[in-house]
Image (cartoon, helix red, strand yellow):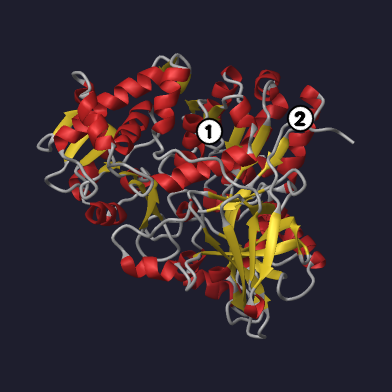
Amino acid sequence: MAVYRDVALGMLTPALSEKPGGVRIIRSVEGLEALPARMTDPLDYWAVAAPERVFLAQRDRGGDWRKLTFAEAHSASSRIASALIRRRVSAERPVAILSGNDIEQGLLVLAAMRIGVPVAPVSPAYSLVSTDFEKLRYILAKLTPGLIFVARAAPFERALRAAAPPDCEIVCTEGRIDSMATTPFSALLEGDADDLQVARVRQGVGPDTIAKVLFTSGSTGQPKGVINTHRMLTANQAMLRHWLPFVKDEPPVLVDWLPWHHTFGGNHNFGLALTNGGSLYIDHGKPLPGGIDETVRNLKEISPTFYLNVPKGFEELVARLRTDSGLRDSYFRRLRANFYAGAGLPPHVAKALDEIALETIGERILMVTGLGATETAPAALACTKETARPGLVGLPLPGLELKLVPNAGKLEARLRGPTIMPGYWRDPAQTAKAFDEDGFYCLGDALRYAEPGRPEGGFIFDGRVSEDFKLVTGTWVSVGPLRAQLISAFAPLAKDVVIAGHDRDDIRALVFPDFESCRAALGASPSVSDAALLAEPALRRLFAARLGQLAKGSTGSSNRVTRLILLVDLPSIDASEITDKGSINQRAVLTRRAALVEALYAEPPGPDPILPES
């Protein structure tokens, strides 16, 4: 059997206790190392221990790497911290960031956290994709920022004019906005740092000080601001250091596109480099057919030691690894492990990565994952070597308690520990709803044992409790696993699937196609419109055949999909059909496209639904 490249993972030994009503509590018996008081304390350490090591890097306009060392990051963030103190930003008037990952944002985040000022990186989609700016208005009104940062003024001008508070200073790396209080980012770096004043203010910053406010899309309503304290962030990094001891042995080198307004990129990955003296090369590519080119360029120059991505990112990367020997050699040269999160990894992608690794280096690279949320800072469960199998999300990390509560035939997951948020920003009602009577955060996910009754075997993600529904027969439909099964069966032709059937006789689906993959499958010209492509009989036959194969393998009405409709219109961020991180809001899609749901169930069926091939 093919071996894996040697990599150490920490032990996660579960201890199980049972409570009345079938409730179970699982925790890891391993302990955590001592925590820094502040998330920025590692910057002080590495600025002395490894002053010349690259901490952050990004491409400049000429294509060369612009690099920032730990010593330079420490000095620059100190000067920015002094500038923020002079501006009287505070816990009541925090810093908001509207643009994407770059060195300036990293420095601003570090500076604000050093002096106890919350920083709120907001999804650029709310400024650049949205057309009504409603969510951005809501966020900024809720946040009451004292300073807003954008990298370039011009792309954000409309959003800032529509949503920025009139008394708020706007800081831009490039450009300015007429008639608005606009300051160049360079002004924050002018002059020497007032080290005594920064040190004095820093003394008031502790584990319970708010470090960040991260706004999550949520499944309904307006975004919620998740409070992230310094304790949450430092405890989560201690958990990761226990689970991934190789990052302590060798400072990690990351090539990463994941956005810092999300907990995966901004807390997990940025924190991994900062805490362990690692180097984070900012990748401005994206896991899309066009955007992957920049990622490939970066990976051919920088060999990562640990690579983290979403499943779609790995899928796009696999296609390039197959055909580019230079990419293969660089990517696998010193890679210790791969990590995916955000969705299930399709089996064909995992298999392809193994095959390519074997061809390139003669051994496979361990693929791991876990489970978490913005409210958990984020890592909560993680795979051991024994549980690193497709579908498993592992075991609770040290310091956390996992509570499993029977709910509609499933085990609902709840969490308690030092990485759990204290609440939502200025929203006591939503905060109260988020916790149970014992102080456990209600994650909203369901889990099931990989090996019945044995927590040692790890846990499998069993869908979102709020998405599941009953057919008219009373049969429960587990939406999460069924949706993942459909996406895998249609891969790579479908980007996402929405499951319909609440109070109906059977299950049917709305499918968001991957238009590029559908064109490739048919050999269709790019000039063919999306609507014309979806009407092609050959493409409809492809979907019908795969739907028929699924039907043959189904075990009953709870997992048999009887019809589907291909959607030509992309999901709308303004209508909350899609979150800013690209995940589908099942409920919003079904509500907004109610007419299409009715067409799915019309008898006799009209021309749009596709039925399974018998």
Q: Which mark is residue 350?
A: none
67 shown above or below 527: above
Q: Nearer the viewer, mark 2 or mark 1?
A: 2
At a point 49% along the width and 50% down the height, the residue shown is 582
102 shown above or below 432: above
Looking at the image, residue 337 sits to the left or right of residue 272; the answer is right
Q: Position of residue 110 (x, y in %)?
A: 35, 33
Q: Residues within 10 Å of mark 1 (few under 14, many from 20)?
A: few
Which quarter of the figure has residue 463?
bottom right
Which quarter of the figure has residue 556?
bottom right
Amino acid type assigned to the residue bearing label 2 in the image: Asp
Quadrant location of the C terminus in the rendered image: bottom right
At a point 12% along the width and 47% down the height, the residue shown is 166
The answer to which of marks 2 and 1 sits earlier in the sequence is 2
Quadrant location of the N terminus in the rendered image: top right
Q: Which mark is residue 6?
A: 2
At a point 58% along the width and 23% down the height, the residue shown is 299
Mark yes or no: residue 177 visible: no
138 shown above or below 204: below
Which quarter of the figure has residue 83?
top left
Element type at mark 1: loop
For the residues marked 2 and 1, what is the alpha-carbon distance in whole angstroms? 34 Å
Q: Position of residue 216 (x, y in %)?
A: 41, 54
Q: Position of residue 596 (x, y in %)?
A: 52, 69
Element type at mark 2: loop
Q: Which residue is mark 1?
A: 290
Amino acid type assigned to the residue bearing label 1 in the image: Gly
- Judging depth in this view, the residue of 453 and 25 nearest the camera is 25
